[in-house]
Image (cartoon, rainbow, N blue to C red):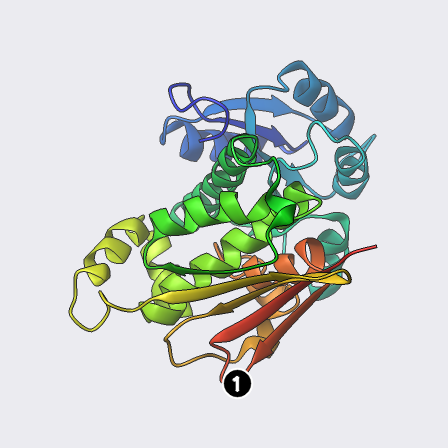
């Protein structure tokens, strides 16, 4: 959970349909979320600024009076103090054009009406957890930033999710803009552990996240003989032109091409955005090699 693990997670619902709001409130309050409600984008923005240190996730309707969902996103993304808060957009149907417009505006999570409680909670948990993890990593960056730019070539080996967190924070400090790359490094290292070395498929992760069993499955597989000795190899190298991060796992690979952009068909899933967001936001160039178990990430230096 972002900011303070002791406090209640807060969700801001921005929706002019009182019936939808009541359904969302019932589901979220049943999971001990603090729910704040606004009837349109204008009031939603006021509530967000009023509770700026409390909001962990925004559930946003697309069609509203005064200020619609896309207009609200333009405002959100223009404000550095709130632009990283995850947004789940509600849509009556996952229509491709609307989803693509939302993705372009910075919305990467979608709920299709009518809601199924399990899917709603799975998507919200996933978004909140991702936001909390990235926020924590940002907060830890200051512990590592100093003279790391002097490092030109080094190698690392990681095995588990704890390793992913420590190495992500450490490596981000090597880059000129650590805040830009930290999410991408985290996502790609995590993919290498869970999907690569531990062999968790996309479909399996969907089920695990729906049942909130993902962490338990990770820990269980790490104890199995066929997985416990597998490592992710990470090579950092820097020259006068660029910084490159080479990440290689011991898995069988995957069809990486379909994950390089956010797909409207996966927009309502609780996961499956990490590679696309890394490609779009964190690195200047992202290249997969071989069967897909090796990825080269590049940041150009001016």
Residue 291 versus residue 17: which sits nearer the camera?
Answer: 291
Q: Residue at x 52, y 85 (%)?
A: 290
Residue furthest bottom as drawn: 290
Above or below: residue 260 compared with residue 70: below
Do we see residue 90 in this rendering?
no
Q: Along the line of sight, which residue is nearer the eye, 132 or 62?
A: 132
Other residues around mark 1 within 10 Å, as few (<14) / some (14–19) / many (≥20): few
Residue 28 image position (x, y, % from top left): 43, 32
Q: Is residue 253 above or below residue 276?
A: below
Residue at 48% x, 42% y is 124
Residue 236 quadrant: bottom right
Q: Which residue is mark 1?
A: 290
Q: Residue at x 39, y 65 (%)?
A: 232
Q: Nearer the viewer, residue 221 or 123?
A: 221
Residue 235 relative to residue 279: left or right: left
**In the image: residue 169, left or right of residue 220:** right
Residue at image x 70%, y 27%? Answer: 81
Question: Where does residue 118 sit, x and y in percent of width and height?
Answer: 38, 48
Question: Taking 145 as reference, is 137 left or right?
Answer: left
In the figure, residue 147 lies in which quadrant?
A: top right
Whether residue 255 is visible: yes
Q: Position of residue 141 (x, y in %)?
A: 55, 35
Q: Position of residue 111 (x, y in %)?
A: 56, 50
């Amino acid at each position: 959970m972002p900011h303070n693990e002791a406090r209640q997670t807060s969700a801001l619902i921005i929706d002019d349909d009182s019936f939808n709001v009541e359904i969302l409130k019932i589901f979220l309050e049943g999971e001990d979320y603090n729910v704040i409600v606004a009837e349109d984008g204008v009031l939603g923005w006021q509530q967000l600024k009023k509770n700026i240190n409390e909001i962990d996730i925004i559930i946003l309707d697309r069609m509203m009076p005064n200020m619609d969902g896309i207009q609200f996103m333009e405002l959100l993304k223009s404000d550095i103090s709130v632009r990283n808060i995850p947004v789940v957009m509600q849509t009556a149907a996952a229509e491709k054009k609307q989803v693509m417009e939302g993705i372009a505006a910075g919305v990467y999570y979608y709920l299709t009406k009518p809601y199924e409680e399990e899917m709603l909670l799975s998507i919200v948990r996933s978004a909140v957890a991702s936001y909390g993890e990235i926020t924590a990593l940002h907060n830890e960056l200051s512990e590592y930033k100093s003279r790391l730019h002097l490092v030109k070539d080094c190698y690392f080996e990681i095995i588990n999710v704890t390793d992913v967190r420590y190495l992500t924070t450490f490596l981000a400090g090597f880059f000129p803009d650590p805040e830009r790359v930290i999410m991408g490094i985290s996502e790609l290292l995590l993919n290498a552990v869970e999907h690569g070395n531990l062999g968790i498929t996309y479909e399996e992760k969907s089920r695990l996240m729906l049942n909130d069993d993902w962490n338990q499955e990770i820990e269980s597989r790490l104890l199995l003989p066929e997985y416990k000795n597998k490592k992710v190899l990470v090579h950092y190298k820097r020259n006068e032109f660029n910084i490159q991060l080479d990440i290689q796992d011991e898995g069988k690979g995957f069809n990486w091409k379909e994950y390089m952009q956010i797909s409207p068909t996966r927009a309502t899933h609780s996961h499956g955005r990490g590679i696309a967001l890394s490609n779009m936001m964190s690195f200047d160039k992202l290249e997969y090699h071989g069967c897909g178990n090796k990825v080269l990430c590049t940041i150009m230096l001016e």
